[in-house]
Image (cartoon, grey):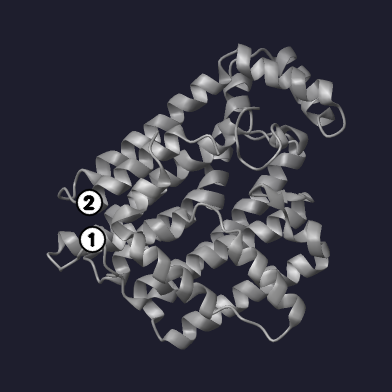
Amino acid sequence: MISLDSIRTPIASDIEAFEEFLKSRFQSESKLMSQMLEYVLSTHGKNIRPMIVMLSSALCSSANSREWVAGERNCTKRTYLAAMIIEMMHTASLIHDDVIDNSDCRRGRPSVNALWQSRNAVILGDYLLARTMANGMESAQYDIVSHIIGSMATLCEGEILQSQHQADKDTSRNDYLEIIYKKTASLISISASAGALSVMASREDQQKMRRFGEALGMAFQIQDDILDYSRDAQTGKPANNDLREGKITLPLIEVLEKCSEAERLQILERLSACGEDEQAVDFLQGVVESTGGLAMARRTMQKYIDRAVSILSEFEDSPYRSSLINLCAFVAQRDK
């Protein structure tokens, strides 16, 4: 199993420098705000988006014959800035998402809303977005800021689209793919292209990295939805959380596309009861497992992984390309 530590190796020093860069730009005179900030910044997850920004930056620098020495701090502040904007937008969206879903757990620890109530969690998410935009504008790196900022609107559209289909219980495959592109893949796509932009890579290389990030992001979210059906996964969230929230994700879509109308109605009826009935949850878990929904979803996920790796093959071999290829394998194999 490939580890994130091995993937980070070529940019390990830059990740350390980035974390200091991040903390130095999010400070408050308010005692409560400072407590919440310290908690959020100390409980960041896998740092996959900043890692993609930095690896993309390194890959494109290497491709353009710029000197890039592994083991040393090589990223410029432009790259750290891009990584910061993306990671804080992502973090704010998770805080708001936990409020919307009334989730009391995030990354294996109590969520912000569980510790400080929903009203303070919303304010913290807003504060992170405001400070992020202020930091971006104060940097005067307007190309970086404008390249990234539109993805926040895309993410919000994805959240609304999911809520709409969740309420109507009518999520089709195309609906699902649009939702996960907007909610997840769009920001990972921007992470890859922003890294390239931060080192002034060619427009062609920026587009390649954007397509790479989109494919990886689609695979990432599909694997996340597969893991929700795995009771052995270590995601830091309860298993079958999507079922309890009434969400139709790819493993269940694979089943719905192949069953009869009567079976479909029965499945949707059980789904409506999952919020309060654990037997309904167990029933749908069993249906998805027994009818091959998980296996079919994995095949779809692997197609996106293969697409991402294929795009990387257009770049010359380097430690950064190898790390990005290994990241693709990690996404496909991860259990948390």
Name which residue type carries label 2: Pro
> Could you say where residue 91 lies in the image, as x and y percent from the top left?
59, 62
Label 2 CA crowd tier, 10 Å (few <14, some 14–19, many 20+): some
Query: In the structure shown, which secondary structural element does the residue marked by tag 2 occupy?
Result: helix
* Nearer to me, 38 or 120: 38
262 above or below 150?
A: above
Q: Considering the image in quadrants, where does the N terminus appear?
A: top left
> Could you say where residue 42 lies in the image, as x and y percent from the top left?
60, 63
Label 1 CA crowd tier, 10 Å (few <14, some 14–19, many 20+): some
Q: Residue at x 57, y 58 (%)?
A: 44
Q: Considering the image in quadrants, where does the C terminus appear?
A: top right
* In the image: residue 222, left or right of residue 18: right
N-terminal of the pair, mark 2 or mark 1, is 1
* In the image: residue 185, left or right of residue 35: left
Locate residue 179: give its quadrant.
Answer: top right
Q: Are marks 2 and 1 in contact (CB under 8 Å)?
A: yes
Q: Nearer the viewer, mark 2 or mark 1?
A: 1
Q: Residue at x 77, y 50 (%)?
A: 104
Name which residue type carries label 1: Ala
Q: Residue at x 51, y 35 (%)?
A: 223
Q: Which residue is mark 2?
A: 319
- Residue 48 visible in the snapshot: yes
Q: Residue at x 70, y 31 (%)?
A: 240
> Could you say where residue 114 lies in the image, as x and y percent from the top left?
80, 56
